[in-house]
Amino acid sequence: MNSNGTNTPLHRLSSIKENNYADIDLSLHNLFWALVIFSILGYAVEQAAEFIKFGDFSSRQGMLYGPFSQIWGMGATISIIFLHRFQKKNIFLLFLLCTLFGGLYEYFSSLIQEFIFGTVSWQYFYQQYNFQGRTSLLFSIYWGIVGVAIIKYFYPLLCLQLKKFPRKKMLIVTWIAFILIFIDAFLSTAAALRYNERHLKIPATTEFQLFIDKNYPDSYMKNIYPNSYFKH
């Protein structure tokens, strides 16, 4: 490290701010890695919160395989796409927009999950200022704080770090990761759909549905998604 401290992480983070975040890149490549990384970070945050609250760990996965909480990853990525233009504005304005986005995102995510899969994974009836139990003022504020951190600091820093990797090698790694995660997402969706259909006493009618029932029975799904429950 230089005696003036110009190589410290704090100085590098400050230099991003001074450059007005010129290194932000909304390419599909960068957004894909934002989706992946923030899904992993979201999973880690939920596991830590689970341990702090209950003194134990339980599955907080959003997909069958891997430490992914895609609700976090998708939320972060969507907020980057639509709110990045406000990163140079007043930080309080960005916070308000991220808070509003977080509340709407959580509400409609809960609605979509229930409509497609027949389940819900969170409810906030126990909190003041909740809306139909699907979102609450407190968690909207959490989304606001996290959104500001992502848009102003973490995503610009991620863009800078991705530039350091050799382009051809990074492209290969990205495609491999995309294929594996796509397969994971496909199987996770199919398993969740059959989980609901079995709950509704709908029998399997295809070889693929039989494959899903055999490899991802109710006991397996309850272990992966212990906080998910059927509404009807």
Image (tube, rainbow, N blue to C red):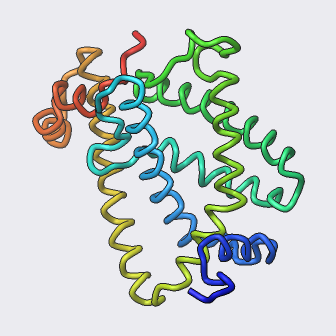
Q: In this view, does 55 lie above or below 19?
A: above
Quadrant assignment for the C terminus:
top left
76 relative to 141, above or below: below
In the image, what residue occupies the spot 31% across and 30% down? 225
Q: Residue at left 62%, top 27%?
A: 107
Q: Taking 91 as reference, is 74 left or right?
A: left
> Is 160 on the left-hand or right-hand side of 190?
right
Vertical side of 76 occupied by 141: above or below: above
Tally the numbered discs. Answer: 0
Towards the viewer: 199 or 14: 14
105, 124: nearer the viewer: 124
Picture coordinates of residue 41, whole percent (x, y):
46, 51
Q: Which of 99 and 221 is in front in this view?
A: 99
**Split into 4 quadrants, where in the image is the N terminus?**
bottom right
Q: In this view, does 77 lie to the left or right of 200?
A: right
Residue shown at 88%/56% (left/top)?
A: 89
* Spot occupied by residue 174 in the image (x, y as percentages of width and height): 41, 74
